Amino acid sequence: MSPTSEVPEPTAPAAVADASGGRPLTAGTAMLATVVAVISLTVGGVLTVVNLTGHVFGAWPSPDSLSQGLVGAAMLGTAPALFTVHRTRLWQEARTLLYPLAVVLVGLFGVSVLHAGDLFIAQGGSIVPVLFSLGWLLTTGVLAVAAVALLAWQHLVPATPLPARTASLPGWSKPALAVLGSSWLGIGAGLLTRPGFWSGFVPWSTNRLDAQALGVWALVLGLGVLGALAEDDLDRTRPALLALPGTGAALTLVLACRATSVDWSSGPAAALVCMVAGLLFAGASGRVLLARSSAVTRGT
């Protein structure tokens, strides 16, 4: 027998995925995340920067630039995490970020269609807001349909049983994550379903469309935090761990720059500060714990 006959055959990528368990991430899902990341970076950056100057700019008119700025900040803050999705090999490593992504795309499109008469494209005005409004409606619509279709296709990919968790969340973090996620989820659901009532708890001036758009993002942040809690594995939540502090930092920047628009003496303002700080702390502590877990694994 020749020595070359002892060399093993290369293992196909699919076989590697099967060996480690789980459902392989499809190319379409990874591409969706990258496309949304590019759009979020550009559109979110424009919304954030323009509205930081105090000028209201967006797909619809608002009584204050802060609401549009926060929508842009949320888009901007999640973009870096979406850029990392293509590096993941398994769906289970990205689903805590991609499920909320689908919800936010469908939610923003639904809110925009529900209030189509309030968009600049219907109300008219200068050419830039009208064109931006048209682009917003078309882009969110196409991305919402693509997200639903690609995630449905993702779930048709054959999967094997997942291996045991390698980096479970520490026990002390779980109650705090449950409170943080429930807080964002609750206020988001309230703003989305009953904006007339719950917008009274927003410590700055908003209209109905502002309240529901902010509600979509708050709902999604809550889903992301609670999804990470349910996953209970830092290795499977790497992209989400990057999205939390990124979004928290972007929201903090906008709130700090537009501080004069906020009624800081109110209870909702204090609650908002705690919730944004919770995003920053959850993401930062998660990254630290993940780094320590990886170091221990390499050491063994």
Image (tube, rainbow, N blue to C red):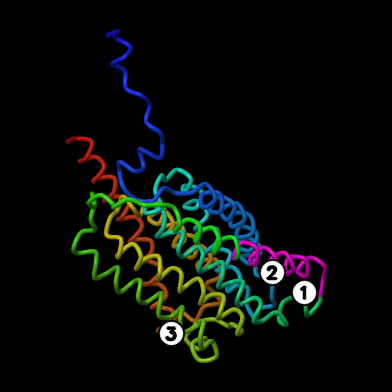
Q: Earlier in the sequence, mark 2 or mark 3?
A: 2
Placement of the N terminus among the 4 image quadrants: top left
Q: Nearer the viewer, residue 164 or 190?
A: 164
The span from disc 1 to disc 2 (Cα, nearest Å) is 9 Å
Placement of the C terminus among the 4 image quadrants: top left
Residue 65 placement: quadrant? bottom right
Left/right of residue 172 with respect to residue 276 in the rendered view: left
Q: Amino acid at mark 3?
A: Ser
**Disc number lying in front (2 or 3):** 2
Q: Residue at x 63, y 77 (%)?
A: 64
Q: Earlier in the sequence, mark 1 or mark 2?
A: 1
Q: Amino acid at mark 2?
A: Leu
In the rendered image, the vertical position of residue 140 relative to residue 32, given as above or below = below
Q: Which residues are magenta?
A: 125-144
Local SS, label 1: helix
**Disc number lying in front (1 or 2):** 2
In the rendered image, the vertical position of residue 29 relative to residue 225, given as above or below = above
The span from disc 2 to disc 3 (Cα, nearest Å) is 34 Å
Q: Nearer the viewer, residue 73 or 182?
A: 182
Give the residue pinned by disc 1: 121
> Mark 1–mark 3 contact, CB under 8 Å?
no
